[in-house]
Image: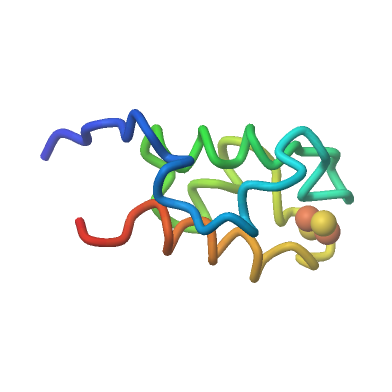
Amino acid sequence: MKFNPISNPLDKLPEILKQNLKRNLCVCNEVKKIDIINAIANGATTLTKVRDKTYATSGNGCCTRQVERLIECIHSSE
Ligand code: FES
């Protein structure tokens, strides 16, 4: 099955999740929130895939819940 990238991931996020896009969401590995959002939009539909692509959550996992929330929002209704 072919994955279609999501071209407007920001439109799927509530306002509060669109803030601080250029700040590190994953501070352990210095991964910016926008880079995580783009990885999710381009096919990283699970935590493991996001970790493989960006290294986010591979520190002590403290950003896991936030990354899960982004995945839920961006891939909702699919
Ligand atoms: S902030 Fe991402 S693993 Fe700690």
- Residue 26 against residue 34 in the figure, above or below: below
The x and y percentages for residue 34 are 64, 35
The residue that appears at 82% across and 39% down in the rendered structure is: 23
The x and y percentages for residue 19 are 71, 47
Give 56 or 67, whichever is nearer the viewer. 67
The x and y percentages for residue 42 are 39, 32
Please give left or right for residue 32 compared with residue 50 in the image: right
Give 33 or 46, whichever is nearer the viewer. 33
Total labels: the figure holds: 0
Please give left or right for residue 20 compared with residue 10 in the image: right
The residue that appears at 77% across and 43% down in the rendered structure is: 20
Q: Quadrant of the N terminus?
A: top left
The residue that appears at 58% across and 55% down in the rendered structure is: 15
The answer to whether residue 59 of the structure is visible from this angle is: no
Please give left or right for residue 38 compared with residue 33 in the image: left
Give 12 or 4, whichever is nearer the viewer. 12
Q: Quadrant of the C terminus?
A: bottom left
The answer to whether residue 69 of the structure is visible from this angle is: yes
The x and y percentages for residue 71 are 46, 57
The residue that appears at 76% across and 65% down in the rendered structure is: 61
- Residue 45 against residue 23 in the figure, above or below: below
Seen from this angle, which residue lies furthest left?
1
Give 39 or 61, whichever is nearer the viewer. 39
